[in-house]
Structures are given as structure tokens and as C-alpha cells.
């Protein structure tokens, strides 16, 4: 008799509790978060108690009130049911999952069983494959909201009957590694790209010893002015070429390789010619903007060949740009002080600046003809 | 940028492992007696019947009569309890006839109808309409009606056209329905006519069938009564509309404990228009599990707050709604466009966001309430020109709704 009274009381309390909580009515959804640490998997999978009851029956005494005791005692059944509908493979080998602890979680549409999971993969995997099949047989509108993390990267996805699996390669674009890789590529692209180097050399050879329009030489009397000039030009050039590099690498525009490569050669010719027959003096930063746009689109070609990772594209792009700038700055730091140091030497003008510019001019011309008219020498 | 870069590096540096764990909260209940959930399965006889029927169906999943029976019951429960899980159960029963189609059809990959049973196809279309996959639903209904005359499909097709603002096309399906069900055909026809310049005669037509409603199924009774109230409300006959809504409400209550979410939402909107937000909270205090009804409660509370009345639960309801919209979007569902736009406009007072949501919703749903949302949001955002497609629709269809016409006029009123 007392037990009966207790039941009724429990019902009334529960009912009032529920009208207060007013759990929403929502479509069936589970929430799965997994972390991969080396070869170890751990995580939490929240499955609505209502859905579990529908699938395997949790209400042992059939009174419509699901108690923690009933859920706890069904722990093995819940584990067996849920884990038979989730399979995780590491590089093609199954990572067995276990229910480490059963807890409870509150969601908008009611209480959920929170399955605390652990699992072991044979080794740190390059690729994780996840197959999800919870509840689809009794409710195809069920969705599994998935969040996987490994090595600081996170991937989210929605599992549905038409898309029940996810393949993920967490190692491929680890942000730290991506950054280093693309930084390195950016630096080496400049240091090994002759046209880029020659263009920069031609631009900065006369930093401290400039031929005046109409004849004579203008010689800097402190390092400050030529360095400032160089900095201005480098900045203008950098901003412009980061802009075209980025938009081209992101695939927003496509430049014709032949046009771009020929234009780069033309800028080399112009920079060298400008040292011999000054055409542009104070407007050099503006010229650098124009040339920067051209060089940026050329460098983008290298980046496109390398390929941008699907996740962390922005990081890769940023790293590549920074690499390019570091390499350019290293060249400027070499050429400008050297030119300043030798500014009063006649030999610098007649053995370095003029012959150097002539050489650059000739090479630029050859490149231009070669690239613009698809002409091969020999 | 710096901070997120730092965070990324910290996370990337490893050693995070289990400590990073999960962003989800969980706990251990204090003892075994703690009640965690009220289970509809054990509590509701209809749900239990459905569950038992599933055992039978599992044994013979290709029995069309059994599957249709199961799906029909599940859909009925989904409607009477406003609980989308039941629609999912119905979909499972129909799945053997639609292999490889889980509802994400996009109208592109739908198979030919072949000799699929008529009621199975019709139920599938009903589920697709419920998921707002209108193209998919229309595909099956057209295919079915080309093959054979099937009354329920006529009604579903008419309602599908009406939801999309194609009332002129709906008239034909309503008329074809007369052979099968006069009450449904009359209500259907009145609904279409009321949105095409004949609201007064539509209301008169509904009044002629009122005496027969007592013997009709409760769904039919509530539909007709609610529609009559809505037409009166659109015609600006406020007191008459209130009386009609009360009559529909009484019919709902006398039929049993089930709540009719459509009726309740329509009545709440009428009360809000009449400047009676406090009546909305009283009407809906037991219905907050249903997103659309919690939304009306929040709008009412927001109006009260703007009038200087203390509304302690507004913030909670606002957060709950936002969380529910987020959850729906995470799943990839598109069923809440109208409600999200209403929420942005009337609860969050974010007219710009409301306008873009309302315009997106207008691409899918085109009932007077959707037209009104676009107009109100456009006016509130100071971009009345953005509502041009709605004005065109109003011109094309002669909607007799003084409020809508006022909102659409070049110099909108204060509403």
C-alpha cells in the first residue's frame, strides 16, 4: 500500500517537474564527441533515453517513469546496442570501443544517456574511418551530430542514412605542421626562383647610388634614406603581391600562366632598364605595386601546384606569404647595406651597377621572348 | 587572430588528451530512484499500440497494408503531439518502398512510381511536406494522381499548393476532392477562395457546413473552425474572430487531451494582433514543448516587456528558442524558417536578420503569415523595396487582408 502511494507521489512530482522543464519536442538526434590522442580514443556519446527505450526497452517495470536505477542496470544492453551501431577503423583496422562509464546528460528535448567511451587503435592512425548506424532502422530522420578531434584539429559532421560514414585524415593538415611546411615553401620559392631574385636585385642595386635623370649620380649620405626607400618599395610590393597571391591561390581568379610569366620577365627588363636610363624615380613604390600584382600571381602558380589543404587554407596561405616576405627581406638586407657601403666607389657603379643591370636586362629580355613567344633557344 | 593562433598552437602542441575531453556536460544522478524521463511508450496507449504494431511490422516489413497502417498512426501521433519523432517512425515503415531515399531527395533522385501502393506513396509525400521538401512531395503526388485518382492525395496536393501561395492551382484539387469528402472539399475550396478575393463568400460557405461538423472526425472539425476564425481575423472582424477561435478551442478541449498546435498558434497570433499578450501566456502555458508555441509565448512576453510589465521568464524562453533553432540547423533541417524570422523580428528586434530570414522563407512558404513577415521586417529594417516580391504576390491574388494591404502600401502605418 505504501509502495503504491509512493508511486503516485513520484508520478505527480515528476509530472510537475516536467511541465516546468518543458523539454522541447524535437527530431531524434545523438551527439558524439571523440578525441584521438596518439592511438587512444576517448569521448562521450549522448543518446536520448527515449530513443534507447524505443529501441531496446529500458522501462523495466513498465510504469512510464524511467529511473536512474533502470538505466544503470541496463548499462550492458545499452553498451551492446550502441556500440554495435558505431564502428571506428584506424587505417583499416578496427578500434574496439568500450563503455567506460554511463552517465546522464540534459538536452533540450529531455535526458540522455551519456556514454563515456574509450577505445584503442593499433597505432597512431593516418586516417580514421567512422561508420554510424544508430536508430536509422526505426527512425531514418535520426541524425548523429559528430565532432572528432585529434592533434588540435576538429572536424564536425552530420551522420544520416544517406551519409553514414566519415573518413578523416587528421595528420594531413595539422596546423602547426602546415604552417611550417608552407613557410618553408615560401622562403625556398623566392631563394630558388631566379626571375624573382633578379628583379629584386635590379630594384635594389641602385638603392644608395642612383643615376639621375639627365645624367650624373645621386649618392645617399646616410643609410637611413636608402633603407627607408627600400622599405617603402618592399612594403608596396609585398602588399600588392600578397593580394594577388591570395586571391589566385584561393581560386577566386585564374591568371594565364603564359601572360603572367611574360609579364614577370617584362618587369625584370624594366627594372634593369630603369637603372641605366632612369624613367621612374620617386614613383618607384607605385611601380612596385603594379609589379607586385604581377609577381604575386606568378608565385600563386607555385602554391597552386603545391596545393592548399582543405582545412587550414588560411594558415597555409599566410605561412606561404610570410615565407616569401622573409626571403625578400633577407635579400634586401644583403643588397642595400652592401650598395651603401660601396656607394662612393667608382667600381661599384661601373663594375657592379651598370654591368649588373645590363646583364639583368639581357636575361630579362631572353625570358620575355622565350615566354611570350614560346621560343626555345638552341 | 593572435589569440586564436596561440590557441591553435597550444592545442596542436599535444599533451591535451583526455583533459581536453568533451565540451558536453554529464553527471551521475544522486541515487537509483531519481526519475530521469517520462516515457511516452509506457504512458500513452496510442504510442504503445504503435510500438506493438512495429513488432509485427518488423517481422513482415514488406506488408504494404501493415506499413501504411503503422505510418498513418505514427503521423497522427506526430500531429496530435507535435512531436517530430513520430514522423521519423513513419518514415521507417515506408522505407522499404523508397530504398536509398532518406528524405534528402532535393527532387533530383526520385524514382518512378511504378506500382508502389497508393497509400504508401501518399504517406511518403505527407512526410516530405512535413519536412518542407515540397518539391519531393509534389513529385510523388503528381506521379500518383497521374496514375490514379486518390482522395487523400488531392487534399495533400491542395494544401501543398496553398502553403506555396499557389491558391489558384489548389482550387482544382479541392474540387476533385468533392467526390471523396464533401467537408474536406468545401474547407479546402474556402481556404483557396479566401486567398483570392472571395473571403466573405468563403466564410459563408464554411458556415453552411458547420452543422455537419459535429459528426465529422475531430481533425476536420478543428480545421474548418480554425479556418473560419482565421478568415474573420484577416477580414479585420476582430470580435467575430475571437468568438470563432473560442469555439474551435472548445471543440479541441471537448475532443480529449490532444492539443492542436496549428489552432493554438493561429489564435495566439490573433490575440497578439488584438493587443492581448497576457492572454497568450494563459492560452499556451502547457504547450511550451512545441517550438512554434513557445515562440508565441516569447513574443507575448516581449510585448509585455515593451509595455513595461515585468517578464521574468522572457530571457529563459529566448535562450531556449535560440538553442532549439541552433539544434535544428545543426541537424541540417530547414523546417523552422518562418519561426526563426518571427523570432528575429518580434523577440530579438533584429530587423535586418529578420528580413533576410523572412525573404529566404518566402522562397519556400507563401501563406499570408509569410507575406506579412516579409513586409513587417522590410519596413522595420527601413528597406520596404526588399518586399517587392510580396507586393507582386498581393497584387496578383487580391488578398483581402486590410493589415497586409496597409503594410504593403508605400507609406506603411505604425504597425
Image (cartoon, coloured by chain):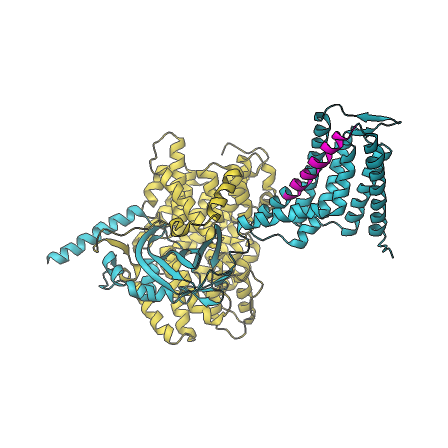
Chain colours: A cyan, B yellow
- Work out whether residue A57 can be spotted: no
- Tag count: 0
Image point 49% across, 59% down: which residue? B129
Residue visible at 75% across and 23% down in the picture? A221
User: Could you tell me residue B87's position as x and y percent?
Assistant: 41, 61
Which of A331 and A13 lies nearest the eye of the viewer?
A: A331
In this rendering, does residue B36 appear at all? Answer: yes
Q: Say if A84 sits above or below B197 in the image.
A: below
Q: Is residue B151 magenta?
A: no
Task: Describe residue B411's horizontal placement relative to residue A147 as left or right.
Answer: right
Q: Main secondary structure of the magenta part?
A: helix
The residue lying at 51 percent from left, 66 percent from top is B101
Q: What quarter of the picture does the C terminus of chain A occupy? A: bottom right
Residue closest to the eye, A322 or A92: A322
Q: Quadrant of residue B60?
A: bottom left
Quarter of the image with the N terminus of chain A in it:
bottom left
Locate residue A341 relative to residue B251 in the image: left or right: right
The residue furthest top is A221
Residue ranking furthest to the left:
A1
Residue B205 on image: x %, y %: 46, 53
Residue A290 x/y as whole percent = 76, 38
Of B87 and B379, nearer the camera is B87
Range of magenta residues: A323-343
Foreground of the two, A111 or A20: A111
A342 left or right, relative to B66: right
Where residue A25 appears, x then y in whole percent? Answer: 37, 53
Q: Residue furthest right?
A: A214
Residue drawn 48% across the image and 71% down it: B97
Amino acid at each position: 500500500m505504501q509502495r503504491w502511494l509512493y508511486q503516485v507521489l513520484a508520478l505527480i512530482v515528476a509530472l510537475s517537474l516536467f511541465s516546468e522543464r518543458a523539454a522541447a519536442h524535437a527530431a531524434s538526434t545523438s551527439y558524439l564527441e571523440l578525441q584521438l590522442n596518439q592511438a587512444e580514443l576517448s569521448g562521450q556519446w549522448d543518446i536520448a533515453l527515449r530513443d534507447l527505450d524505443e529501441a531496446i526497452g529500458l522501462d523495466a517495470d513498465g510504469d512510464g517513469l524511467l529511473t536512474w536505477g533502470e538505466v544503470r542496470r541496463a548499462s550492458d544492453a545499452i553498451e551492446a546496442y550502441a556500440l554495435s551501431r558505431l564502428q571506428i577503423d584506424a587505417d583499416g583496422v578496427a578500434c574496439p570501443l568500450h563503455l567506460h562509464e554511463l552517465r546522464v546528460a540534459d538536452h533540450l528535448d529531455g535526458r540522455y544517456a551519456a556514454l563515456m567511451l574509450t577505445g584503442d587503435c593499433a597505432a597512431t592512425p593516418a586516417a580514421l574511418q567512422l561508420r554510424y548506424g544508430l536508430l536509422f532502422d526505426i527512425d531514418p530522420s535520426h541524425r548523429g551530430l559528430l565532432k572528432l578531434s585529434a592533434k588540435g584539429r576538429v572536424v564536425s559532421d552530420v551522420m544520416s542514412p544517406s551519409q553514414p560514414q566519415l573518413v578523416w585524415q587528421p595528420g594531413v593538415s595539422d596546423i602547426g605542421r602546415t604552417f611550417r611546411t608552407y613557410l618553408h615553401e615560401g622562403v625556398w620559392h623566392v631563394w630558388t626562383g631566379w626571375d624573382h631574385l633578379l628583379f629584386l636585385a635590379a630594384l635594389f642595386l641602385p638603392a644608395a647610388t642612383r643615376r639621375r635623370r639627365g645624367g650624373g649620380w645621386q649618392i645617399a649620405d646616410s643609410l637611413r634614406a636608402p633603407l627607408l626607400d627600400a622599405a617603402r618599395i618592399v612594403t608596396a610590393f609585398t602588399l600588392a603581391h600578397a593580394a594577388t597571391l591570395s586571391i589566385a591561390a584561393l581560386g577566386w581568379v585564374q591568371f594565364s600562366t603564359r601572360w603572367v610569366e611574360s609579364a614577370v620577365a617584362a618587369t625584370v627588363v624594366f627594372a634593369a632598364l630603369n637603372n641605366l636610363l632612369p624613367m621612374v624615380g620617386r614613383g618607384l613604390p607605385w611601380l612596385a605595386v603594379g609589379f607586385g600584382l604581377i609577381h604575386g600571381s606568378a608565385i600563386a602558380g607555385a602554391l597552386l601546384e603545391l596545393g592548399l589543404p582543405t582545412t587550414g587554407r588560411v594558415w597555409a596561405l599566410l605561412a606561404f606569404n610570410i615565407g616569401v616576405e622573409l626571403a625578400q627581406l633577407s635579400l634586401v638586407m644583403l643588397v642595400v647595406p652592401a650598395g651603401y657601403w660601396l656607394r662612393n666607389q667608382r667600381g661599384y657603379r661601373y663594375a657592379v651597377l651598370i654591368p649588373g643591370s645590363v646583364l639583368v636586362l639581357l636575361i630579362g629580355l631572353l625570358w620575355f621572348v622565350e615566354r611570350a613567344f614560346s621560343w626555345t633557344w638552341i | 587572430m593572435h589569440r586564436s593562433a596561440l590557441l591553435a598552437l597550444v592545442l596542436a602542441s599535444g599533451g591535451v588528451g583526455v583533459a581536453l575531453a568533451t565540451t558536453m556536460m554529464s553527471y551521475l544522478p544522486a541515487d537509483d530512484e531519481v526519475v530521469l524521463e517520462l516515457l511516452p511508450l509506457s504512458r500513452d496507449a496510442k504510442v504503445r499500440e504503435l510500438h506493438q504494431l512495429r513488432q509485427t511490422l518488423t517481422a513482415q516489413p514488406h506488408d504494404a497494408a501493415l506499413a501504411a497502417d503503422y505510418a498513418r498512426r505514427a503521423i497522427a501521433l506526430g500531429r496530435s503531439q507535435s512531436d517530430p519523432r513520430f514522423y521519423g517512425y513513419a518514415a521507417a515503415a515506408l522505407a522499404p518502398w523508397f530504398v536509398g531515399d532518406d528524405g534528402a531527395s532535393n527532387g533530383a533522385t526520385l524514382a518512378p512510381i511504378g506500382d508502389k501502393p497508393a497509400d504508401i506513396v501518399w504517406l511518403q509525400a505527407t512526410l516530405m511536406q512535413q519536412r518542407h521538401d515540397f518539391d519531393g512531395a509534389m513529385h510523388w503526388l503528381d506521379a500518383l494522381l497521374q496514375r490514379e485518382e486518390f482522395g487523400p492525395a488531392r487534399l495533400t496536393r491542395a494544401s501543398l499548393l496553398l502553403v506555396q501561395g499557389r491558391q489558384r492551382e489548389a482550387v482544382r484539387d479541392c474540387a476533385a476532392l468533392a467526390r471523396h469528402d464533401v467537408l474536406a472539399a468545401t474547407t479546402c475550396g474556402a481556404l483557396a477562395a479566401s486567398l483570392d478575393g472571395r473571403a466573405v463568400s468563403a466564410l459563408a460557405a464554411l458556415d453552411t457546413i458547420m452543422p455537419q461538423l459535429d459528426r465529422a472526425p475531430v481533425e476536420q472539425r478543428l480545421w474548418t473552425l480554425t479556418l473560419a476564425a482565421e478568415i474573420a481575423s484577416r477580414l479585420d472582424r476582430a470580435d467575430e474572430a475571437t468568438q470563432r477561435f473560442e469555439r474551435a478551442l472548445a471543440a479541441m478541449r471537448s475532443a480529449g487531451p490532444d492539443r492542436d498546435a496549428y489552432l493554438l498558434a493561429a489564435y495566439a497570433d490573433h490575440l497578439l494582433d488584438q493587443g492581448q499578450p497576457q492572454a497568450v501566456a494563459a492560452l499556451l502555458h502547457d504547450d511550451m514543448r512545441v517550438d512554434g508555441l513557445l515562440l508565441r509565448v516569447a513574443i507575448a512576453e516581449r510585448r509585455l516587456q515593451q509595455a513595461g510589465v515585468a517578464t521574468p521568464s522572457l530571457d529563459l524562453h529566448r535562450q531556449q528558442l535560440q538553442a532549439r533553432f541552433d539544434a535544428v540547423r545543426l541537424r541540417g533541417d530547414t523546417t523552422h524558417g518562418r519561426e526563426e524570422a518571427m523570432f528575429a523580428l518580434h523577440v530579438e528586434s533584429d530587423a535586418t536578420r529578420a528580413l533576410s530570414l523572412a525573404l529566404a522563407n518566402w522562397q519556400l512558404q507563401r501563406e499570408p503569415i509569410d507575406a506579412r513577415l516579409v513586409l513587417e521586417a522590410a519596413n522595420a529594417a527601413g528597406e520596404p523595396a526588399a518586399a517587392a516580391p510580396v507586393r507582386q504576390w498581393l497584387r496578383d491574388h487580391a488578398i483581402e487582408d486590410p493589415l497586409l494591404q496597409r503594410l504593403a502600401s508605400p507609406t506603411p502605418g505604425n504597425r
